[in-house]
Image (cartoon, helix red, strand yellow):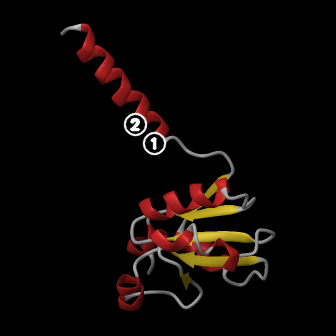
Amino acid sequence: MDMMQWIFIGLILVFLVFRFKPVKGITHITTQEAKAKSKEKNVQFVDVRTPGEYKARSSKIFKNIPLQQLAGRTSELDKEKEVVVICQSGMRSMQAAKLLKKQGFEKVTNVKGGMNAWN
């Protein structure tokens, strides 16, 4: 391999490390832990799936704010309260959690496994 191929491989590795490394301050919980949190008053629940996915199967505790709209709708959320985010599998909610942290939300929690793991 020549030098350009090694540089290219190195750049891909750096991208992957930064793309998938956990963001500090984001908590990860199971669906059972999320259900237990539903009784707490200082917690807000956000489902970042599309409206179609949300209508097909959702939990009443979650407010639907699709991931594509989240950056423009953070004013609907209270930065003083914990935000629990969910999607179908946990990937989009992780993106949403990172976005919320960057927007100044202190307590952000991602539901591992998403609605696929919700019983």
Looking at the picture, how far across and down is residue 2, in whole percent?
20, 8
- Compute the Cα span from label 1 to label 2: 5 Å
The quadrant of the picture occupied by the N terminus is: top left
For the residue pair 71 and 17, the one nearer the viewer reads as 71
Query: Mark 2: which amino acid?
Result: Leu
Q: Residue at x 43, y 29 (%)?
A: 14
Q: Quick one: which residue is furthest to the left in this view? A: 1
**Could you say whether the residue bearing mark 2 is in a helix, strand or loop?**
helix
Q: Residue at x 75, y 59 (%)?
A: 106
**Could you say whether the residue bearing mark 1 is in a helix, strand or loop?**
helix
Kindly indicate the quadrant of the structure image that contains residue 34.
bottom right
Query: Mark 1: which amino acid?
Result: Arg
Relative to 40, say whether 20 is above or below. above
Looking at the picture, how far across and down is residue 40, in whole percent?
75, 80
- In the picture, the disc for residue 95 is none
Residue linked to disc 2: 16
Q: Residue at x 50, y 58 (%)?
A: 95
Q: Quick one: which residue is furthest to the top in this view? A: 2
Viewed as shown, does residue 39 lie left or right of 22? right
Looking at the picture, how far across and down is residue 8, in whole percent?
29, 22
Kindly indicate the quadrant of the structure image that contains residue 33.
bottom right
Question: Looking at the image, do the residues carrying marks 1 and 2 touch, with CB atoms under 8 Å apart?
Answer: yes
Mark 1 crowdedness (10 Å alpha carbons): few <14, some 14-19, many ≥20:
few
Residue linked to disc 1: 19
Q: Residue at x 26, y 8 (%)?
A: 3
Viewed as shown, does residue 52 lie left or right of 43? left
